[in-house]
Image (cartoon, rainbow, N blue to C red):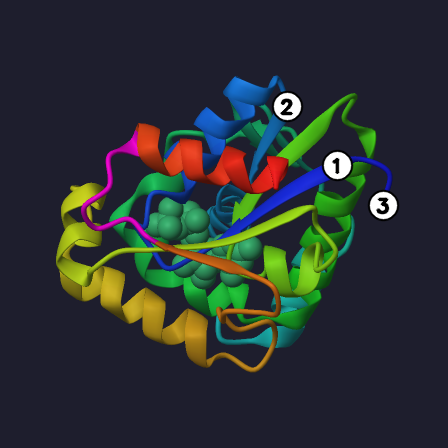
Amino acid sequence: MNGRVIAIDGPAGAGKSSVARAVAERLGWSFLDTGAMYRAVTFFALDHGIDLSDDESLEKVAVGLSISITERVVINGRDVTAEIRTPEVNSKVSSVAACSAIRRALVEQQRIFASEQAHGTVVEGRDITTVVFPDAEVKVFLTASLEERAKRRGDESAASVAARDEADASRVDSPLSVGEGVTILDTTNMPLDQVVDEVVACLRK
Ligand code: CDP
C-alpha cells in the first residue's frame, strides 16, 4: 500500500459517507464510497437480468468489471449515479455483496484506487478496517441507534436498514464486524462536525 488511508466501517445510515467526505475535504485527501461500488454492480446485474442468487452468474459479472467513482459512478462505461439509490437496489445489494468473486474484484480496485492518490484516501464501507486496509493509519467504526440511522437515511425504512445490517453482519465473506485496533464512535447524539473532529484527531494521535 503506497497511499495513506483512513478506514471507516459501520452499519447502514451511520453517516459514514458524510463523515468520510468531510474528513477528506478537510485534509485535502480523496474519498472512496465502496458501498456505491457494490450498489453499481447490483444495478448492473439487475439491468442485465442476472439471477442474483446464482453465484456462477455473478462470478461472470465480476470478470472484466470496471468501476470509476468520482463525482459520478460509472460501471463498464455507463453512468449509474442516480440508479444505484433505488429501493430495489437497497433490497438486493447485500445479497450481491455476499458473493466472494464480486468482493475480490472490488477490493482489488479499491486498493489500486488508494495507491494512486497523491495524498491519502478516506475509504468507507463494511470491511475496510478488517479486510481491505487492516493496516490503515486510522480505523474507525461509526454507529448510531437504529432509529437515528433510519431517520438519517430518510429514503429507506427502518426495516430495510435492519435487514441490510443483519445480512451484512452474518455473511461468511468479510462480515461487518469491529476489528482489532478500531475506534468505535457512537454518533447518535453527535453533530457531523464533532464526528469529523474526532476522526481527524485520531490521525494526529
Ligand atoms: O450508505 P449505506 O450505509 O446505506 O450503504 P452503502 O455504504 O451504500 O452500502 C450498500 C451495501 O453494500 C451494504 O449494505 C453492504 O451490503 C455492501 N457493502 C459491502 O458489503 N462492503 C463494503 N465495503 C461496502 C458496502
| Ligand 1 shown in quarter | bottom left
Q: Estimate how packed mark 1 is, as few (under 14), some (14 to 19) or many (20 or more) residues with alpha carbons within 10 Å.
A: some
The residue shown at (75%, 36%) is: 4
Q: CA distance from mark 3 to mark 1?
A: 8 Å
Image x and y of residue 21, in percent: 47, 28
Depth check: give the residue in front, 170 or 4. Answer: 4
Is 191 placed left or right of 130 in the picture? left
Q: Tell whether label 1 touches label 3 (CB within 8 Å).
A: no
Q: CA distance from mark 3 to mark 2?
A: 16 Å
Image x and y of residue 112, in percent: 80, 41
**Lower position in the chain sequence, tag 2 or tag 1:** 1
The residue shown at (32%, 50%) is: 14
Quadrant housing residue 122: top right
Image x and y of residue 205, in percent: 61, 42
Specify start and end residues of the magenta stretch as a single range. 186-192
Q: Estimate how packed mark 2 is, as few (under 14), some (14 to 19) or many (20 or more) residues with alpha carbons within 10 Å.
A: some
Q: Estimate how packed mark 3 is, as few (under 14), some (14 to 19) or many (20 or more) residues with alpha carbons within 10 Å.
A: few
The residue shown at (18%, 46%) is: 189
In the image, which disc is placed on residue 1? 3
**What residue type is disc 2 on?**
Trp
In the image, which disc is placed on residue 119? none
According to the image, label 1 marks what residue?
Answer: 4
Image x and y of residue 50, in percent: 52, 62
Image position of 2 with respect to 178: above or below: above
Indicate whether residue 45 is drawn in magenta.
no
Instruction: Give the dominant element type of the magenta stretch: helix, strand or loop.
Output: loop
Is 113 placed left or right of 179 in the picture? right
According to the image, label 2 marks what residue?
Answer: 29
